[in-house]
Image: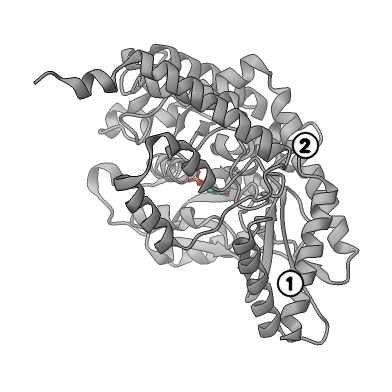
Amino acid sequence: MDKQLLKAAYSHEDFRENGHQLVDILAEHLNKTLNRTSSKVINWEVPGEEYKFWNNFLLHGKPSELNNEIIKRSIHLHHPHYMGHQISPVAPMTGLTSMLNAVLNNGMGVYEMGMAPTAMERVVVEQLCEEIGYNKKSNGFLTSGGTLANLTALLSARKKIASKDIWEKGNSHKMAIIVSEEAHYCIDRAARIMGLGEKGIVKIPVDKNFALNTELLEEVYKKTSNEGFEVIALVGSAPSTATGIYDNLDGMGNFALDKGLWFHIDAAHGGGAIYSSKYKSLLKGMHKADSIVMDGHKMMMMPSITTALLYKDGIDSHNTFRQKADYLLQESKEEDWYNLAKRTFECTKYMMSLHWFTLLKIYGKDLFDEFVTTLYDLAQKFGKILENDPCFELAVKPMSNILCFRFVEKDLDLPTLNKINSGIRQKLLEEGEFYIVQTKIKGTSYLRATIMNPFTTEEHFLDLLKKIKARGTLMIDK
Ligand SMILES: *Cc1c(COP(=O)(O)O)cnc(C)c1O
């Protein structure tokens, strides 16, 4: 065997040439999308046809066209008309850190398999903890996504709070977690994975502004306890995904402290607001949380998936997966902060800290302030436009960069309007000039926009609304 393929696959010259080409292609892609000379956000294709295309491409496609086809057939987050799901148009610099990560491929399972990223991770985490207002006891790590981070935090909660040692003895015990009915579905899923069952996830209704109704906390807590459940945690959303509304974290923090519950904040989306001098008050009371989740790939301009899980008391992060209760780490100064895999779900994980550290080093933390403040300001503007237009109705005044609104026409009933709004969203998707999503709240269908691109302007909002009105009017006439 002459190992031709291996030689080709590891050719540094091929890498250099293809790499330069790809960087040029991506730079041009950014130029076109950010400046909107490429007209579409998405070239919509139905799943079956997309599958056929790629099946055929594997056999007959030209290798030189592969990258261009991938870009053409992907949604363009850097387009100012992208106002859909809560994923960042990344700072292009993190495309380069992604490449560095991929080529070095330090797996971080043990310290020597990632010395630099392990130490950088500690620096980044300490910086985040300080920003939150945690003291020196705090600690944390980076992990693969908000979903996994929420599950990890709730496992830490169970380890610390539950009166039985579930980790050793198994689950023979009724436990509950209290959360808003608007919390992200992954909290419900985490509770079920932990064996709490449907009854173990207690959902508190939201108030008229879609925040967890804190007035109901006492009553729900009592009722749950009286039914024989040991309540272990209270979870706040910062903000909730559907409507973008922040819970009253300060009030919830006080309640949790009073009852001896673990207070967890799911700030996967809006934790980055801690960097915004204008909007950080939304996170008032954040430092009272025992654990906090923040996604780098949502409001912090990083690639998927890059998440911070932070603990008020760092020792709790060391205890989650520890085998024997008697060995629970106490206030020991011997904590091996550099063996991250003892604290995370992952064994191997990618070098996420490269993104955080590089952005901090090259641009500084004010970059996050500019990003979050710009997007939240834009959402306020969009909210005002919607409020002043009789063709539209806002579900709730925006608190973050998420807006839920619908096209309305006074003579039409709810089922008809639901159908029209769903129809508008489908039409927009297929046309591909704008990208927004939809959500259903208490039986009403809303269009949902998340302003993710700091280069979106008021003019783009007006163009979008004009388009929605035209589509909506057409559907009424039908
Ligand atoms: C996005 C989101 C999650 C899930 O995070 P992933 O990183 O997508 O796993 C959890 N909670 C909230 C509030 C979110 O917005």
Between 203 and 185, the one lying in front of the other is: 185
Residue 124: x and y in percent read 55, 21
Between 254 and 282, the one lying in front of the other is: 282
- In the image, taking residue 33 as reference, residue 346 lies left or right, namely left
Identify which residue is drawn at 61% across, 68% down. 426
- In the image, taking residue 141 as reference, residue 411 lies left or right, namely right
Q: Is residue 476 above or below residue 333?
A: below
Identify which residue is drawn at 66% across, 49% down. 82
The quarter of the picture where residue 476 lies is bottom right
Which three-letter amino acid code belongs to the residue tagged 2?
Thr
Tell me the CA gap for discs 2 and 1: 32 Å
Instruction: From the image, tell me which residue sits under label 2.
Output: 373
Residue at far left of view: 1
Residue 456: x and y in percent read 76, 44
- In the image, taking residue 433 as reference, residue 20 lies left or right, namely left
Instruction: From the image, tell me which residue sits under label 1.
Output: 471
